[in-house]
Amino acid sequence: MKQHSIALLVLLGMFTLPSQAMTPEEKGLQIAEEADRRDRGFEDSIATMQMVLRNKHGDESKREVRVRTLEVENDGDKSMSIFDAPADVKGTAFLTFSHFKGPDDQWLYLPALKRVKRIASKNKSGPFMGSEFAYEDISSDEAAKFNYRYLRDESYEGMDCYVLERDPVDEYSGYTRQVVWYDKTEYRPQKVDYYDRKNDHLKTLTFHEYRQYLDQYWRGMRYEMVNHQTGKSTTLYWKEYTFQNGFTDRDFDKNTLKRAR
């Protein structure tokens, strides 16, 4: 009797319907949420960054920036960028409150005018400090800011990657869509293709020289943003990351912008 029962179970198992496969949208969201989950819990960070701007002829200009970031529970990160050099931008400070839902809040302090300027939602597709990064690129990459679709698996720079398309939720985004390569091992973004409002390929961002901090958090030491339509590019060189500095919300308010040092 026992043998017959086992045989019956095996037979039934052979005809069990497989669980319903995820849709491309569900799989894309799952991958994005896993990438987001792996970067939670760092609390805060500070780093120095050199921004190198190149025109289509290859002429360069450089800027020195300090970037502070604060992780916010149940919302996007807060960040502040303080420009130290050259002299014509020294003292300029930029503050971003990223949000899961709705447009981000952004303010720019201009020392020459001694005033804080709010960046309107409709203007966030504009260039940040003359670079090839838009204001909206400076915000943290919250999964809820996009609708996702898994496209394919693909090798990139010798790494097995998931390739996703993500469409910005914000109606004022300068992009119709973005295509992102995440490596399968650590779920780090390796490459992003940006498509403008006409759905033409506008820019490509690539991440290089990843380093791991606190045995968990990965940070790229070099970002390369290339504008395919203008021939301009911007490189961000990162260094001197420190985490868990004890920052609070008081270190990231509009009043802090005016006295940022």
Image (tube, grey):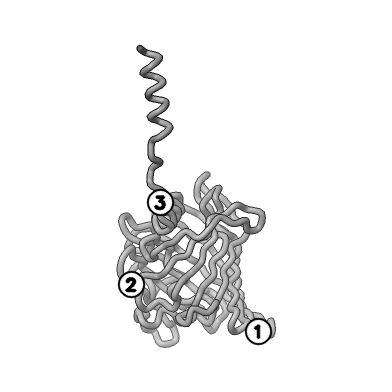
- Which one is in front in this view, the residue at disc 2 or the one at disc 3? 3
For the residues labelled 3 and 1, the Cα–Cα distance comes to 44 Å
* Image quarter in which the C terminus is found: bottom left
For the residues labelled 2 and 1, the Cα–Cα distance comes to 32 Å
Query: Tag 3's secondary structure?
Result: loop
Rendered image quadrant of residue 224: bottom right
Determine which residue is flagged by label 2.
103
> Identity of the amino acid at label 1?
Lys
For the residues labelled 2 and 3, the Cα–Cα distance comes to 29 Å
Q: Residue at x 51, y 54 (%)?
A: 242
Depth check: 46 or 222 in front?
222
> Identity of the amino acid at label 3?
Met
Residue 99 higher or lower than 1, as above or below: below
Determine which residue is flagged by label 3.
22
Total residue callouts: 3
> Identity of the amino acid at label 2?
Pro
The tag earlier along the polypeptide, 2 or 3, is: 3
Q: Is residue 245 visible?
A: no
Query: Tag 2's secondary structure?
Result: loop
Depth check: 84 or 34 in front?
34
The tag earlier along the polypeptide, 2 or 1, is: 1
- Which one is in front in this view, the residue at disc 3 or the one at disc 1? 3
Give neighbour class at mark 2: few <14, some 14-19, many 20+ (Cα, 10 Å). many
Residue 74 placement (x, y as % from top left):
30, 56
> Mark on residue 56?
1
The tag earlier along the polypeptide, 3 or 1, is: 3
Residue 171 placement (x, y as % from top left):
35, 76
Give neighbour class at mark 3: few <14, some 14-19, many 20+ (Cα, 10 Å). few
Q: Residue at x 58, y 83 (%)?
A: 229
- Name the outermost residue toward the top: 1
